[in-house]
Image (spheres, rainbow, N blue to C red):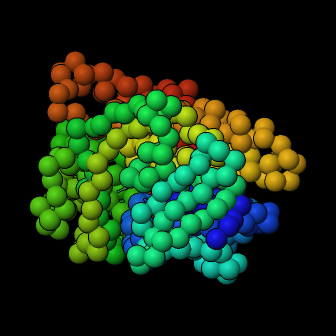
């Protein structure tokens, strides 16, 4: 089989790239390891920057997002029982949109299927060959049957555990990593969210986050030990701990109920450089990971896709390599700013096992500075709503 762009991975990065390329008549094939239901069953991001909203509009997939997504003009931050608000719209003129990654992915699958897009599921044994030549190709199997996909370019959108990053030789790749000494236990419950905005809570017992998917579907997280497993936490134990971490006035009005999903995500900061090797381009989690505190994972995948999509259009429409040659440098410039913000916000809001009394005083002072200083709130708001592409 032959295509212009072979896309490894049918998550949000791969699907968004495939759909955008389609709008400009550029052919792609998406190779996905799992089934569509499995991909849609993963509960992940919940907050979209305007940049991703605009890309979904450009891809012709934003109708449901505009109908069902919620604009959030700010967020609450609590330290113990004290709460203050960061007003995104006051500081930046821009809200964020609360709309689950699952729904983004669902909308993209629907658009690809409607357009007759080629997506192969249950793909195994993916091997990228000739990425450093003018004739890259991908070997893979489906149901034990060996296949080959010839292409002009390969987009590695296969996430942190994919094969694309590993295709770049070790003597070319530089990797940067920070593993955090805790994870996030997340639950979904068919209960009304405790507030209409998010609450990021730093309590003496650890971090908690109040988020949501809609008026009757809440998404809550607590910082947990890396040795925890979801089955270690009964619903009752989760609600009891969650109530002890969010401000008392919010805990008093929290509606609890059975959880319909419970999972633990480890937290890490990770970047691979470069994000390009020959005709292979890495996008999204294949190239970088952030702790979810700043809601930058999905949104930084989106800016990668924006740069690569425009670079490939430049190549096919203007016979110019300028866009693809500058891809890695452009993408990494924004990636590192997202890494910094995610690391800073995680350091501000979590309790670390090795924190000294002095460290705790520094954390309290940093939060007090954010609470009381307009410039600090402006900087926080600009990073949270999304820095320019
Ligand atoms: P993805 O990992 O979403 O998609 C990669 C796809 O490639 C997957 O479908 C996978 O099956 C497929 N694949 C892998 N190897 C393959 C192979 N060899 N061949 C073919 N296909 C292959 N971000 C936030 O902003 N907020 C959050 O709360 C949040 N929570 C998260 C929780 C978890 C457990 C994880 C892992 C991530 C979380 N993220 C969160 C980040 C997440 O949203 C990612 O940034 C986002 O999924 C990135 O999308 P992709 O780059 O498409 O990668
Ligand atoms: C979510 O709703 O899943 C979510 C929101 C904000 C974050 C992380 C996760 O920072």
Q: In this rendering, is residue 255 above or below 292?
A: below
Q: Quadrant of the N terminus?
A: bottom right
Q: Position of residue 155 (x, y in %)?
A: 59, 53
Residue 73: % across, % down: 57, 51
Is residue 38 depicted above or below 4 in this figure? Answer: below
Residue 215: quadrant of the picture = bottom left
Identify the residue shown where x is 20% and y is 26%. Answer: 355
Residue drawn at x 22%, y 38% as measured from the top left: 181
Task: From the top left corner, tell me how far across and down residue 206 is, in percent.
Answer: 22, 42
Please indicate, yes or no, whether residue 300 appears anywhere in the rendered image.
Answer: yes
What is the quadrant of the C terminus in the image?
top right
**Horizontal and vertical percent position of residue 22:** 73, 67
Name the side, left or right, on which 166 lies relative to 262: right
- Residue at 19% in and 38% down: 204
**Residue 38 higher or lower than 45, as above or below:** below
Where 146 sits versus 241, above or below? below
Taking the image in four quarters, ligand 1 sits in the one at bottom left
Can residue 377 be seen from the camera position used here? no
Foreground pick, 73 / 112? 112
Which residue lies most toward the top here? 358
Q: Residue furthest right?
A: 318
């Amino acid at each position: 089989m032959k295509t212009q762009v072979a896309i490894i991975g049918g998550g949000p990065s791969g699907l968004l790239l495939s759909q955008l390329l389609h709008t400009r008549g550029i052919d792609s094939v998406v190779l996905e390891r799992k089934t569509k239901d499995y991909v849609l069953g993963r509960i992940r991001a919940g907050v979209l920057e305007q940049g991703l909203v605009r890309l979904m509009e450009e891809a012709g997939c934003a109708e449901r997002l505009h109908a069902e997504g919620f604009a959030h003009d700010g967020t609450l931050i609590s330290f113990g029982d004290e709460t203050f608000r960061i007003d995104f719209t006051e500081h930046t003129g821009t809200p964020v949109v609360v709309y689950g990654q699952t729904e983004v992915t669902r909308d993209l699958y629907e658009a690809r299927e409607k357009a007759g897009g080629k997506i192969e599921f249950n793909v195994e044994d993916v091997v990228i060959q000739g990425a450093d030549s003018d004739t890259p190709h991908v070997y893979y199997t489906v149901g034990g049957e060996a296949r080959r996909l010839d292409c002009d370019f390969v987009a590695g959108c296969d996430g942190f555990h994919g094969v694309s990053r590993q295709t770049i030789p070790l003597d070319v790749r530089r990797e940067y990593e920070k593993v955090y000494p805790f994870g996030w236990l997340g639950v979904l419950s068919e209960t009304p969210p405790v507030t209409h905005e998010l609450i990021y809570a730093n309590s003496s017992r650890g971090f908690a986050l109040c988020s949501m998917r809609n008026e009757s579907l809440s998404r809550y997280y607590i910082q947990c030990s890396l040795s925890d497993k979801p089955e270690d936490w009964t619903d009752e134990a989760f609600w009891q701990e969650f109530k002890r971490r969010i401000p008392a006035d919010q805990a008093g009005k929290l509606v609890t109920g059975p959880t319909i999903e419970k999972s633990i995500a480890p937290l890490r900061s990770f970047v691979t450089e470069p994000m390009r090797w020959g005709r292979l381009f890495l996008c999204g989690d294949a190239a970088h990971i952030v702790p979810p505190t700043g809601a930058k994972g999905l949104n930084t995948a989106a800016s990668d896709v924006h740069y690569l999509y425009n670079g490939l259009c430049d190549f096919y429409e203007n016979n110019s390599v300028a866009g693809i040659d500058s891809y890695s440098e452009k993408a990494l410039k924004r990636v590192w700013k997202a890494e910094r913000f995610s690391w800073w916000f995680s350091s501000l809001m979590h309790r670390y096992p090795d924190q000294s009394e002095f460290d705790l005083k520094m954390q309290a002072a940093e939060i007090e500075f954010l609470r009381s200083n307009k410039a600090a709130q402006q900087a926080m708001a600009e990073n949270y709503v999304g820095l320019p592409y």
